[in-house]
Image: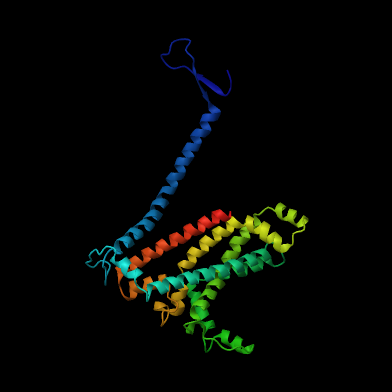
Amino acid sequence: MSTTEVSTATPGSPAGAPARTTDSRTRAPRTFEQANRRLKWAMLAPALVFVGAMIIFPLIFTLNLSFTDAFGAVNAKKGYVGLQNFADALSDTRRFWPAAQRTVVFTIGAVILETVFGLGLAMLMRKPFRGMRWVRTILIIPLLTTPVAIGILWLLILDPTNGIANHLLAAVGLPQQEFLGSVGQSLPTLMLIDVWQWTPMMTLLLLAGLTTLPEEPEEASRMDGANSWQRFRYVILPMLGPTLATALVLRSVDALKTFDILYTTKGAGGGSDFEAETLNVYSYGLTFDYQEYGLASAVLVLFSLFIIGVVVLLRRRGRKSA
């Protein structure tokens, strides 16, 4: 009898009936895998239930509020008004649509600059060099600082009267600027602050992708006479496509949700003329300044749908480029 098979006779079976065989090498691992899979889901279940509840409940609560005329207090008596809040928001050309436009401009401008600078820094740091560890440490400092602290720091740096930025401009003979105190300069200045904070993240993500790329295609293109730009454009960039697409999705969603720096530097309403008011700042003002909870919830629902649309669009473009 084979050592891998065990013959067992069924009780009450007639003599000479074929015995059942069990392959110990195939059944034992399969049973272990099933038990391991069940144990994995059992261990994850509490965390999944908790996270799901923390996500699903606020979404349902906000969606429910968006169909009501809730005002003054969330638990106050309210009635359902259907899609009236959505109609009011979409017809608001004074606050809603300008805020949506600023959100798009801020996100596109910041993400493009962060991607360009991050990819450039990642390419420079691709090959090891002396002091590389210190450079990486310095790069992550902005990521470790809270957005509120960064907002206060840049308020001091860009102060029109006592800030160091205008002193440096005057030292090189350039005219002083109002920066955050100007209606026209506020949004570009905030974009540059966001670039300063989040370019390191793009650099680290793209650098991680670059370190995983195979070297053979680049070496082959170098032997064929391709210059540095051609190797980057036709060899490195296509291979880096999936990593680049993922980094763009992550950073775009995060930039769309930017609130801390905007509110810290410009305050309620994004400034006296709403010059830095994005959808996040607008919905915050509706909630805590005007206590229009129904309208604020409708704006948040529209904002969430917009973010989902951006994610889907970027993912589709990422698949096509890959």
Q: Is residue 112 left or right of residue 70?
A: right
Query: Considering the image in quadrants, where does the N terminus appear?
Result: top right
Along the line of sight, the residue nearer the viewer: 305 or 147: 305
- Position of residue 17 relative to residue 289, above or below, is above
User: How many marks on residues?
Assistant: 0
**How is colour applied across the structure in the image?**
rainbow
- Name the spot of residue 271 as percent of width and height, x first: 42, 80
Along the line of sight, the residue nearer the viewer: 135 or 224: 224
Q: Residue at x 65, y 57 (%)?
A: 211
- Name the spot of residue 241 as percent of width and height, x first: 60, 57
- Position of residue 150 relative to residue 22, above or below, is below
- Name the spot of residue 7 as percent of width and height, x first: 51, 19
- Position of residue 17 relative to residue 298, above or below, is above
Q: Is residue 199 left or right of residue 271?
A: right
Q: Residue at x 57, y 24 (%)?
A: 4
The answer to whether any part of residue 221 appears in the image is yes
Along the line of sight, the residue nearer the viewer: 319 or 245: 319
The answer to whether any part of residue 128 appears in the image is no
Residue 257 occupies quadrant = bottom left
Q: Residue at x 39, y 54 (%)?
A: 52
- Name the spot of residue 33 as percent of width and height, x first: 50, 37
Residue 206 occupies quadrant = bottom right
Residue 242 occupies quadrant = bottom right
